[in-house]
Image: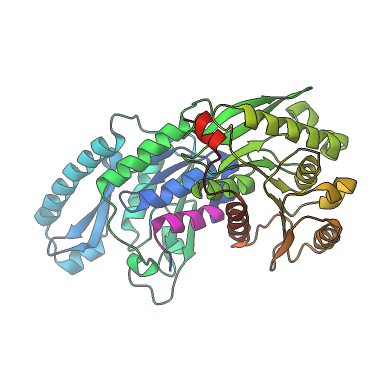
Amino acid sequence: MFKDRSEAGRLLAGRLSALAAERPVVVGLPRGGVPVAFEVASALHAPLDVLVVRKLGVPYQPELALGAIGENGVRVVDEDLVRMAGVSPDELEDVERRERSELERRITRFRDGRRAVPLAGKTVIIVDDGIATGSTARAACRVARALGASRVVLAAPVGPPGAAERLHPDADEVICLFQPADYYAVGQAYRDFSQTPDDEVERLLARASTRSAPSGGTVGATDPEVFVQTRDASLAGSLTVPDDATGIVLFAHGSGSSRFSPRNRYVASVLNGRGIATLLLDLLVPDEEHDRRLVFDIDLLASRLAAATAWVRENDGTAGLRVCYFGASTGAAAALAAAGEQGADITAIVSRGGRPDLAGPMLVQVTAPTLFIVGGADHEVLELNRLAQSRMRCPTRLEIVPGATHLFEEPGALEQVASLAGAWFADHLSIQRSPAAAADRG
């Protein structure tokens, strides 16, 4: 069972992480789908909107849906069910009239004057808290297509067996985490399935809207574009600073990746949920990324990570926060090398599928507690991590994700990485901000 809709959204985001490269738009079905969609949009760093649809219920049994209506006049009705339920055309028209009024009310309230996020030409991920009859989801898919979506992905944490097959005519792809054989209601999959009120939907949409707007990296801002000037380059980064952040994690990605890596962005979103700030950084500029010599130039990468660390400690929005590193592949070597420099003062390090061996003699100089996370099926890298761990003098731990390969693409693997990293950083970061942080950040 899911603890609540937020937890379900974070897990669902793990399955959808590969779609981040398509720059999708995430739309939630209000009300219960919006908290799930909020987590997905946060993890994928995608815009969030609502796609309002209303079920058409049997007059004497409203929970039994005969169909649904949506924006732009979309209407989906199960004619066979209408006949079986004995609902007359006049009764159906009365139900539709009432629901159409409610549909318009919700659109006005939820958007609160904000314009709808354009869907034309976009990959649109439609998110609900679960699939019941599928009529609401079907209407949402048709609405998205009517608004010009080039690709429609329907995603839900839970649904009945065969839901994907039934909905494929309307959705290009259906993602459903769990389809229990004894499925009878969406609520059975949640410990907390309390109703989502309208004001909660408004709050989440407002937060998402604020997050999407550039804000210069101030406290409470999410994912503004920032530039870190080093001695020889201007490095692009994505900065997220939750309110009352307890520390900040700088991400150093591996070769062939970038700050837009869906894997690192997913891990960052989980850390943000724990109140930890993140800076996803490109340590090479675009003209350098195709030079294999630079990709493996650990000294260069480490020096730029150190420059970014100095920038974080001087930036108004992050000054005073304790600094941690998260490195993947060659980025892990850069993180360890930078942390090994005298006076680096790094609080904790996590290496995901890293190449710590490339940090060479700097390994023995690292003092920050270091967690190595390696896939159980990534045999060569696992041995390199074990060897590096044996050479280090600081507190270390090796966590093996069973069955996972180098990129942790297997179902549930990335979620384990995020959970392990989040716990490691939370354990080693001070719960209270330092006095300097409190003074510097108001």
Q: Give the extent of the magenta segment.
A: 2-14
Q: Quadrant of residue 341?
A: top right
Left or right of 326 on screen, residue 423:
left
In percent of width and height, residue 347 lies at 67, 46
> Residue 69 vs residue 333: left or right?
left
Q: Is residue 87 left or right of residue 275?
A: left
Residue 345 position, x and y percent, is 71, 41
Q: Does residue 245 sit above or below 129 in this rendering?
A: above
User: Which image quadrant is residue 297 in?
Assistant: top right
Specify the principal SS of the magenta part.
Answer: helix
Q: Is residue 285 visible?
A: yes
Residue 439 in magenta? no
Magenta stretch: includes residue 7:
yes
Q: Position of residue 231 (x, y in %)?
A: 78, 22
Vertical order, 352 against 61 (above or below) = above
Q: Position of residue 225 (x, y in %)?
A: 58, 28
Can you name the residue that lies furthest to the front here? 435
Task: Identify the residue at horizontal 81%, vertical 64% (top origin).
Answer: 379
Coloring basis for residues: rainbow
- Name the residue rendered at 75%, 39% in the picture: 344
Q: Quadrant of residue 71?
A: top left
Residue 50 showing in the rendered view: no
